[in-house]
Amino acid sequence: MELLEAIKKRRSVRSFKKEDVGEEDVNKMLQSACLAPTAGNVQPWKFVVVKNPKVKKDLAVSALNQLWMTEAPLIIVACADLNRAERFYGERGRTLYAVQDTAAAIQNILLTAASLGLAGCWVGAFSEARVIKTLDLSPGVRPLALIPLGYPNESPKPSYRFSLEEVVTLIE
Ligand SMILES: Cc1cc2nc3c(=O)[nH]c(=O)nc-3n(C[C@H](O)[C@H](O)[C@H](O)COP(=O)(O)O)c2cc1C
């Protein structure tokens, strides 16, 4: 699929078929995450792939009870490795680059999912403390997004976007 097509096709999907996602496709999504640009190529991220039903449920409860997440055959938890970014870039690395870098990786996961006929949703509303505890994350590893992924069981309409006139300033 062309990149632009995947960008246009991607929707946040919150209902999934029971069908499992093949290991090859999971790896493609993770590989594409790791191809995202990062400040100084520091790659300050960690990914946790959760398939265990009990752990998925715990994550969904952590995410303000968004229980639809448990329908997904897997949830990728995208984490920023704050200490690694700080080692290279100090405070700016810790508070900005690590978050930007990991966000770029998250978008790559979602676009690759779309290109493979899969779908997911970027879930950002969750208790970080609880997710850290559930996944036993190391100090400095900050979970930024829970990404339930699977074969879509719904086809949401395109969501509203501002027009370019509303968000673009041209300086010639
Ligand atoms: C940082 C961030 C946090 C989000 N958190 C949630 C969430 O907790 N639950 C949810 O259902 N969707 C969440 N979303 C998905 C947005 O609601 C969705 O991207 C937006 O409505 C646009 O729809 P679209 O993704 O289909 O284009 C989040 C998206 C982002 C980027």
Image (cartoon, helix red, strand yellow):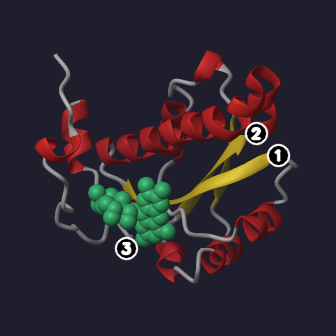
Q: Picture quarter containing residue 127?
A: bottom right
Three-letter code, disc 2: Leu
Q: Picture quarter containing residue 143?
A: bottom right
Asked whether the beta carbons under mark 1 and mark 2 sit within 8 Å of each other, the answer is yes
The x, y position of residue 31, in whole percent, is: 54, 32
Residue at horizontal 21 percent and vertical 62 percent from the top: 159
Three-letter code, disc 1: Gly
Mark 1 and mark 2 lie on one chain; the one further toward the N terminus is: 2
The mark lying in front, picked from 3 and 2, is 2
The x, y position of residue 100, in whole percent, is: 55, 37
How crowded pointer 3 is (Cα within 10 Å; few <14, some 14-19, many 20+) is rated as: many
What's the mark number on residue 15? 3
Q: Where on the image, by quarter, is ligand 1? A: bottom left
Residue at horizontal 52 percent and vertical 37 percent from the top: 105
Tell me if 113 is positioned left or right of 59 in this view: left
Q: Quadrant of the C terminus?
A: top left
3D distance between C-alphas at marks 1 and 2? 5 Å
**Residue to which mark 2 is pinned:** 82
Q: What is the number of callouts on the image?
A: 3
In the foreground, 15 or 124: 124
Q: Picture quarter containing residue 62?
A: bottom right
Q: Element under label 3?
A: loop
What's the mark number on residue 140? 1
Q: Element under label 1?
A: loop
The mark lying in front, picked from 3 and 1, is 1
In the foreground, 151 or 15: 15
Mark 3 and mark 1 lie on one chain; the one further toward the N terminus is: 3
Tell me if 160 is positioned left or right of 10 in this view: left
